[in-house]
Amino acid sequence: MEEKGTFREEMGSNGVFSNKRRLKRLLCSWACLWRIFLILSLLFYTQLLFSSDLLQWRHCDTTTGTAEETTAIIASSAKLTTDSTYSGDLCELQTAWNTLTFGSNPSPKHLKIALFVKKWPSRRKAAGLERHAQTLHRILAQRGHKVHVFTRLLQEPIEVLRDDKAMQFHFNNYSGPGKASSWSLFQKISKKVNGFDIIHSESVSLPDKYAKGLPNVVATWHGIAYEIIHSDIVQDLARDPVEPRSHTLERALKGRVGKVVEEIKFFPNYRHHIAISDYAGDVLRKIYMLPVENIHIILNGVDPKMFRPNPVRGQAFRALHNVPQNAQLVVGMAGRLVRDKGHPMVFRVLREMFMGNQNKNMFFLIAGDGPWASRYTELGSNIKVVGSLSSDQLGDFYNALDIFMNPTLRAQGLDLTLLEAMFCGKPLLATHFSSIIRSVVPSEEFGYTFSPTHESLKKGLERVLEDGKKVVKKKGRACRKRATLLFTAEKMASAYERLFLCIAKGHKNGTDLCKYPLNFD
């Protein structure tokens, strides 16, 4: 009876308490449904993401797939390097613009280009996105286009102003409210120059709320959340069995699907999208569901004058860093020496390979800095970490190698180090990611790929040793030829220039520059 009385008191005369309990149960049920939706979404995206890659990994150790897959890949590679027969509207092209040949005549119109990039590279240190922005827009400025750069104020702005005189810089503070002030600064400059023909954003350097509704905005995506899901899963699978999952990775695995959904929502605010790999272009079309005519694949490019074969300088670099003259194979890595670049996996493999004085004629040169630099010194005298290098020094570094290895666990983007090594005539040993096998290493002719596991990487290195220098050099020559056909900075800049002219409605004697080929192509 006492319990019933208490129950009546809580209920009240109008059943308010009961209604509140029903509402609470309803809200809880919606929360559960939302969690279930997120889990199902993750499974759905993962299935799409790995429908091709994981099947390939199951059947490949150090090659790019089964015999049937390899045949198909080689066929697509041949098409990639000879697809100069395309005819039609460039905005309908669904393969890389780098496969086309654009005229070298002076541009029919000098464009006014506003570039938004969060950081501008310094001589001492620069990430791939900043180097891409600098390389591309230097060439566009040299071709007579008026390039205005909106970027963060650097510690040494004089150095930038001296090195890139052909461009105009508008510095601002990108931390916190600086993003808004950068747009205000852009609006002032835009009025002075009577408007810009093109607004180019490196990733989200220009926030989407300012891009919305502008027909001349072009965003180059160097990594998108859908690709990063792949990276998160690979990093988790690549962990040493005794190593616990980090809190950072735990949070990433739980929240990444939501990030993909957010990108799918706001990416349409940017009118035009440039994917830097064939695979990223597919993702933007099929997963992000962006209009096909607004997606353009332009592969990254590097300056071939900075990266080219030079055996003399390579030998000098070896001597400088005490590489033994009798080294059977010199393998190199470059970049940040951090976990998501695959260095825990590499460390584990090398520890096994060098155990008991094995493989003593194999030598590793590692360029870069990060927490794993000191760990490599534990593995003995067959490994030398040379620290961060300038672009000039990187050319000498690549020339000192027999093969360049990129063990990254990050599936997004298209790493410039792969292209730089190819220009120096070095074959590649790289992770079997779609962005790499479709755009860079489409067959064994250009090197080796491995699943992002320590067993597969170890087999890959053993395969390179088994093939020997003669085979490795042949692959290196093929790499240089492919790089010259597809990955020069001039070819990349020509593709961007033509796209910008097309978007800006640039014409030459009444000719529509969105069409290909033209009589001067």
Image (spheres, helix red, strand yellow):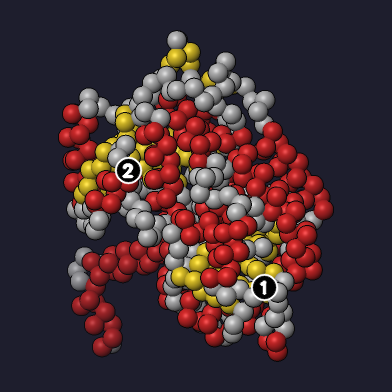
Q: Label 1, secondary structure: give it.
A: loop
Spot occupied by residue 182 in the image (x, y as percentages of width and height) = 22, 45
State how far apart marks 2 and 1 are (Cα). Answer: 41 Å
- Residue that carries the numbered disc 1 in the rendered image: 325
Front residue of 486/47: it is: 486
Foreground: 141 or 449? 141
Q: Hey, what amino acid is under mark 1? A: Gln
Left-right relation of 397 to 72? left
The residue sitting at the right extreme is: 67
Q: Quadrant of residue 94?
A: top right
| Quarter of the figure with the N terminus | bottom left
Whichever of callouts 2 and 1 sits on the residue coming sooner in the sequence is 2
Residue 362 in view here:
yes
Q: Quadrant of residue 312?
A: bottom right
Residue 349 position within the rendered picture, expressed as x and y whole percent measured from the top left: 64, 77
Provide the secondary structure element on which disc 2 rests.
Answer: loop
Nearer the camera: disc 2 or disc 1: 1
Residue 407 in view here: no
Query: Considering the image in quadrants, where does the C terminus appear?
Result: top right
Q: Residues within 10 Å of mark 1 (few under 14, many from 20)?
A: few
Residue 22 or residue 36, whichever sits in front = 36
Residue 218: image location, x then y, percent: 40, 36
How many residues crowd around disc 2 within 10 Å: few (fewer than 14), some, or many (20 or more)? some
